[in-house]
Amino acid sequence: MSAVLEIQGLEKTYRSRKGVRKALDGFDMVVEAGQVHGFLGPNGSGKTTTLRTLLGLIKPNGGRMSILGREVPQALPEVIGAIGAIVESPQFFANFTAQETLSLLAEAGGVDQARVTEVFELVGLRDRAKDRVKTYSLGMKQRLAVASALLKNPTLLILDEPANGLDPGGIREMRTLMRNLADVGMTVVVSSHILGEIQLICDSVTIISAGRRVAAGTVADVLAQHQAASVRVRVESPGDLAAAADTLREIGAQVVVEPDHLLVSGVAQPGAITRALAAGDVFVSELAPVAVDLESVFLELTGTTPVEGVYRQIDESVTAPATPNGGWGQ
Ligand SMILES: Nc1ncnc2c1ncn2[C@@H]1O[C@H](COP(=O)(O)OP(=O)(O)OP(=O)(O)O)[C@@H](O)[C@H]1O
């Protein structure tokens, strides 16, 4: 496999009268050909800044980027024809029909008009192509935006939040569309906050937090690195849960007490839990690794797990406690 997109040590600092804000702090990313790649990060973590920088819309302060093996922004004029992108909601003329909109874009880009019909079909707007854009719903505008990005039949498709405004059926169709595009060889980079979707459609992911990469790899690898970082512990008598939690904290574990079980992390070996509890006459009835999903990995790595009674502010994160051995299964 070869990399369609590579970013190394990207830096971007915004300066305004209000001060200096470091949006990207040595960010790295690699996307292999033919993959659907999820680009994930909390609000304000630097996703749009990265995508805008890649497309030459803003100037970085440092680092290197390449698309299709060519250094950008220098070689952008040579590769831009192979890139389709929607970064932030594109603005269309409200009084034009969708058909007129795409026809104009096709003409401007030297694209055959037959492709306009094809992309309407692909994004599910065939029967509404003759309606004015101002009569379109949010989700229909989103589909039109994707259609416009597909006009050039790009090698690399970059979609910033494509599922925004789509209904569940639309989200599923967008998922199928992205998979189909990847299956015919297109590389798709998709930023999203809908982590369940990303887990379903993406071959690989990059997670960004505060302008830095905090995880990258295939979805399976990223999940495996965090698999079994915590275990669910049930005891024979639920009345013993509070005492069991105290005992486990004494051996250095982090413990969350749930109504009928404990979630325990930060213990080198599961046996240490059974031994410590048995020594206090508390008997374990279940000890099971907790299967993680992308959402819990994301919340942990980006320090954005909700805390009861606390309204997290943008730019604020909670550093997840380090597990001394890096967690089980490693
Ligand atoms: N033009 C700008 N001037 C100053 N700061 C900016 C500018 N654009 C972005 N920022 C700041 O840079 C940081 C990264 O913003 P960015 O838009 O890249 O985040 P994001 O990950 O795309 O967020 P979201 O998920 O909310 O879209 C934020 O703190 C943001 O306030």
Image: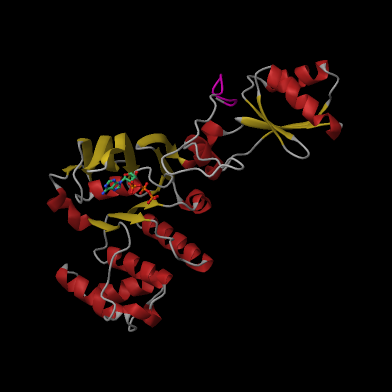
Q: Is residue 112 visible?
A: no
Query: Residue 111, image x and y in percent?
Result: 19, 69
Furthest residue in direction bottom, as rendered: 130
Above or below 274: residue 146: below
> Measuring 25% from the left and 74% from the top, which residue is drawn there?
102
Closer-to-camera residue (172/138): 138
Query: Residue 330, image x and y in percent?
Result: 55, 25
Q: Is residue 262 visible?
A: yes
Quarter of the image with the N terminus in it? top left
Question: Horizontally, is 129 left or right of 192 in the view?
Answer: left
Count all numbered tags in the image, as a single digit.
0
Question: Horizontally, is 183 left or right of 196 in the view?
Answer: left
The magenta stretch spans residue 151: no
Above or below 44: residue 131: below
Secondary structure mostly seen in magenta is: loop
The picture quadrant where one finds residue 209 is: top left
Closer-to-camera residue (96/178): 96
Query: Residue 27, image x and y in percent?
Result: 31, 35
> Measuring 32% from the left and 78% from the top, which residue is drawn there?
133
Query: Residue 253, image x and y in percent?
Result: 65, 22
Q: What stretch is highlighted in magenta?
A: 323-329
Question: Horizontally, is 166 left or right of 329 in the view?
Answer: left
